[in-house]
Amino acid sequence: MKVPTPFLILLSAVVTRSLKVVSKRGSVDGCTDWSVDYLKYKVLLGEPVRIKCALFYGYIRANYTHAQSAGLSLMWYKSTGHGDFEEPISFDGLRMSKEEDAIWFRPTELQDVGLYSCVLRNSSYCMKVSMSLTVAENDSDLCYNSRMRYFEKAELSKSKEISCPDIEDYVQPGKDPEIIWYKECRPKQWRQSIVNRKDTLSIQDVREDDIGNYTCELQFGAFVVRRTTELLVTGRSSVTAGLQSRSLWYLG
Ligand SMILES: *[C@@H]1O[C@H](CO)[C@@H](O)[C@H](O)[C@H]1NC(C)=O
Ligand SMILES: *[C@@H]1O[C@H](CO)[C@@H](O)[C@H](O)[C@H]1NC(C)=O
Ligand SMILES: *[C@@H]1O[C@H](CO)[C@@H](O)[C@H](O)[C@H]1NC(C)=O
Ligand SMILES: *[C@@H]1O[C@H](CO)[C@@H](O)[C@H](O)[C@H]1NC(C)=O
């Protein structure tokens, strides 16, 4: 997954270059701009998040320590959208802090929505990439925002594992995360054939009523982090499913 991305980004950077020179003139002179990284950060209001400078994850070989000892400095800017004015970020060191190659928000607020650009430079070299952050409130009476769900499919009577996605930044290395799982935002007595192990809810025999929204919840300091996955349950036989879609194809 990681390898081809810079090329895709390079392609789009080439395509949009003429536009960018006009809209971003003067913001960062003489800088190679990789535009917006494919990885989008999406969190619920009040959750903590760590935005990593993507330059160190697929654009250049060096890591932060390496770049720093080579005399390059890393700076962060924020804008509210494409082509908007980029302002340097002032970190209060409490809610928002710069830590190595990342910004930590502990926690996020609605005003944090925007594009975050990291610029790595010395007097003769400059690279830049932007990361987008979306902060959204949960839907009313729900513990998630339905536009920020993950999706999984399971087959009837087969087994299925639902993992709690994108939580690496909140788990201490070598420690198992303590995760509570909810279904339709309610705590649940899971039947015996559903096991909660590490970051995974493991269903041994998928039933029709397993369909629905699974939320995992993880404590991180004073905050909680939640991820919601909608599980769809499909028919037992993939042959039948194939026939169904084929007949639909003929009908259509
Ligand atoms: C950074 O890169 C250097 C040299 O390539 C390596 O020795 C070091 O372990 C790396 N540091 C981290 C934190 O990954
Ligand atoms: C700036 O950084 C680049 C890339 O690490 C390096 O090749 C170059 O020598 C540096 N220039 C100065 C003036 O330090
Ligand atoms: C939804 O979000 C609001 C605002 O952050 C919070 O007060 C409320 O507890 C959340 N609702 C649920 C069910 O988690
Ligand atoms: C899952 O969530 C969506 C969006 O909130 C909702 O429309 C749907 O009915 C939920 N599924 C179940 C089985 O409750």
Image (spheres, rainbow, N blue to C red):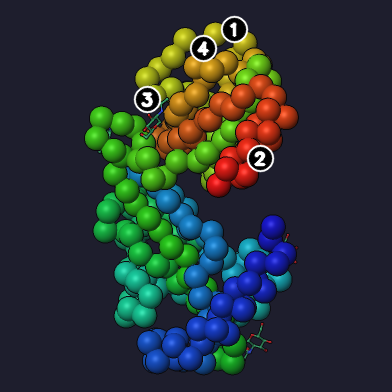
Q: CA distance from mark 1 to mark 2?
A: 38 Å
State if disc 4 and disc 1 touch (CB < 8 Å). yes
The picture places residue 44, in percent across and down from the top left corner, at: 36, 44
| Image vertical order of residue 90 relative to residue 230, above or below | below
| Labelled disc at residue 192 | 1
Residue located beneath label 2 in the image: 246
Distance CA(mark 1)–CA(mark 4): 6 Å
Labels 1 and 2 touching (C-beta < 8 A): no
Q: CA distance from mark 3 to mark 1?
A: 20 Å
The answer to whether residue 83 is above or below residue 21 is above
Asked if the residue at label 1 sits under 8 Å from ligand 4, the reply is no
SS type, badge 3: loop
The image quadrant where one finds the N terminus is: bottom right
Query: Exactly how many numbered labels are in the figure?
Result: 4
Which residue is label 4 attached to? Answer: 190
Q: Position of residue 143 (x, y in %)?
A: 34, 32
Q: Looking at the picture, tell me which residue is in the foreground, 106 or 69.
A: 106
Q: Viewed as shown, does residue 221 lie left or right of 169?
A: left
Q: Residue 209, percent across and down?
A: 49, 17
In the picture, measured across the screen, residue 49 lies left or right of residue 166, that is: left
Q: Which residue is at 62% across, 44% downward?
A: 250
Q: Position of residue 67 (x, y in %)?
A: 63, 73
Residue of label 3: 185
**Foreground of the two, 13 or 94:** 13
